[in-house]
Image (spheres, grey):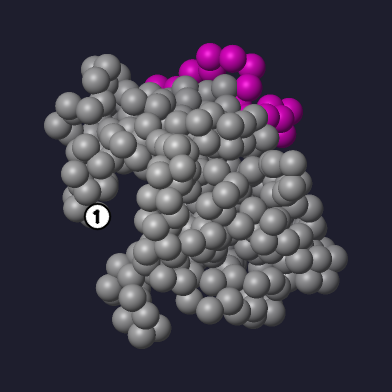
């Protein structure tokens, strides 16, 4: 952890909605004049799209039906830990980009599904923001979580997470229902061992809970809207949180436990900005105090 070069990590499963939190942070950075370097977790996958497909086929032939992007074999956890550590110490580190589509790939003259070359983060940024699957991961070889100054978890209940993933992968990636269900099943052991434990290490968790029937996520025609949901917000250290202020600002909210606020799902963007803004202020203030 570093007061001089803060590292913020937003972590959540595929389809969980981590991009929503990243967007909230971008609003805060723009409003407060903070120069943040954003890293997407896909950049720390071990294999590009074509090689990952080949590796999965190879694993299945050997009887391993659970090889996935969630586990250590398909990711560069040690390199991610090194990025967090070196950024905290020096304000720079090695990064690259994963090119999801033609639009992202065109400026680099590469194909979608490939990585850009590794490069150094330029000096002079205020903080590092990571958004992806493994911002708080810990294994026997890597401890990414220990170098993060602020850890945010995005954890919709699992049926909602699956609904969001199914709709996204069908619409944006053209996958079939059968292929998506196969992916969900293949990832389940790594989900249990490498994704879930992270949310016990996060400083704040945002969990969206639908108030409509999601009992069979595989036939859901629509994603429950924010107004059809409640948002459960859990704080690891409630002593640092001004609960009366949050309750007064988030109309319709209440506390379900001494460290947990529940509010209408439609207030998720407001809740994120109210909660995250002072946390970012604190990190940046500490940074500027030691310049």
**Which residue: 53% across, 52% down?**
74
Front residue of 214 and 209: 214
Residue pictured at 58% horizontal, 32% vertical: 193
Nearer to us in this view, 57 or 231: 57
* Residue 89 against residue 63 in the figure, above or below: below
Residue 241 appears at what percent x and percent y?
66, 32
| Residue range highlighted in magenta | 235-259
Q: Label 1: state its secondary structure.
A: helix
Identify the residue under disc 1. Answer: 173
Is residue 141 or residue 101 the one in the foreground? Answer: 141
- Residue 181: x and y in percent read 28, 34
Question: Relative to 136, does residue 265 appear above or below in the rendering?
Answer: above
Q: Determine whether, in the image, residue 259 is placed left or right of residue 214.
A: right
**Residue in the picture at 26% in, 46% down:** 168
To which quarter of the image does residue 224 belong?
top left
Q: Residue 221 in the image: x percent, y percent?
A: 14, 32
């Amino acid at each position: 952890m570093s007061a001089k070069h803060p590292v913020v990590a937003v972590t959540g499963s595929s389809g969980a909605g981590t991009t929503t939190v990243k967007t909230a942070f971008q609003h805060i950075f723009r409003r407060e004049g903070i120069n943040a370097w954003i890293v997407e977790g896909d950049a720390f996958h071990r294999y590009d799209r074509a090689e990952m497909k080949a590796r999965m086929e190879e694993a299945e032939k050997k009887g391993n039906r659970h090889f996935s992007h969630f586990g250590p074999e398909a990711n560069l956890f040690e390199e991610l830990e090194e990025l967090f550590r070196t950024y905290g110490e020096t304000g720079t580190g090695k990064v690259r980009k994963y090119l999801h589509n033609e639009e992202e790939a065109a400026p680099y003259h590469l194909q979608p599904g490939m990585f850009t070359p590794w490069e150094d983060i330029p000096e002079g940024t205020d903080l590092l923001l990571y958004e992806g699957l493994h911002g708080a991961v810990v294994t026997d070889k890597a401890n990414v979580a220990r170098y993060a100054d602020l850890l945010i978890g995005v954890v919709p209940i699992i049926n909602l997470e699956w609904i969001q993933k199914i709709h996204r992968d069908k619409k944006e990636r053209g996958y079939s229902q059968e292929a998506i269900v196969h992916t969900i099943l293949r990832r389940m052991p790594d989900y249990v061992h490498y994704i879930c434990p992270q949310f016990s290490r996060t400083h704040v968790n945002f969990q969206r809970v639908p108030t409509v029937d999601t009992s069979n996520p595989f036939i859901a025609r629509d994603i429950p809207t924010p107004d059809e949901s409640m948002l459960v917000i859990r704080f690891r250290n409630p002593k640092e949180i001004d609960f009366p202020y949050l309750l007064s600002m988030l109309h319709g909210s209440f506390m379900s436990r001494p460290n947990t606020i529940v509010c209408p799902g439609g207030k998720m963007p407001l809740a994120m900005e109210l909660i995250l803004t002072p946390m970012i202020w604190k990190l940046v203030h500490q940074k500027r105090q030691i310049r």
